[in-house]
Amino acid sequence: MSVWVENTHSSDMKFVVKNKAGFTVLEKTFYRSAVDRATGAVISNGYTELTNEEYELLKAQTATFSQQLKTKKLVVRKEGPNVSNPYTRLVDAKKEIEQLKAEIEALKGRNAGVQQTVNQMQQSETGRPNNPKGQQPR
């Protein structure tokens, strides 16, 4: 099971848990909610998913993490943000790509038909086939 932690503070927070030998055991960054001002795209929704083990390790080993929980700068949520999982997004993206490919093929066929009609109209007006590069036939 996982724990969702929301960063409600105005800056990102990074926590590092080291073992007795001084080696890093866990390193987690809690990004703040951020939106690109130019495009309006969501850069980060402010949520970070932790396993129960990671959550307990952070609470036990880092006093700052516990303090941020107490001051509500980090808030534990039962559910994450309302987004689909990466697999679902991938499947949806593949379906959209297939639809777009089919649409492109339909437009290519339509474009070829329009081009053929234009060539026929120009040929009937001039009495000779249209040369698309503007060169005179030899």
Image: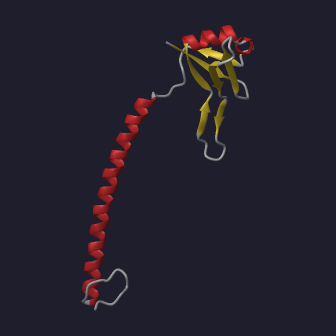
- In the image, what residue occupies the spot 68% across and 20% down? 16
- In the image, what residue occupies the spot 28% across and 67% down? 112
Number of dots carrying numbers: 0
- The picture quadrant where one finds residue 3 is top right
Between 34 and 65, the residue placed more toward the observer is 65
Tell me if 73 is positioned left or right of 85 in this view.
Answer: right
Residue 8, compared with residue 89, is above or below; it is above
> x%, y% of residue 130?
30, 83
- The picture quadrant where one finds residue 69 is top right
Q: Residue furthest front?
A: 21
Residue 95, compared with residue 134, is above or below; it is above
Between 49 and 76, the residue placed more toward the observer is 49
Tell me if 26 is positioned left or right of 67 in this view.
Answer: left
> x%, y% of residue 2?
52, 15
Position of the C terminus by quadrant: bottom left
Residue 103, compared with residue 3, is above or below; it is below
> x%, y% of residue 21?
68, 13
- In the image, what residue occupies the spot 66% across and 43% down? 37
Which colour scheme appears in the figure? secondary structure
- In the image, what residue occupies the spot 29% across and 63% down? 110
> x%, y% of residue 19?
66, 13
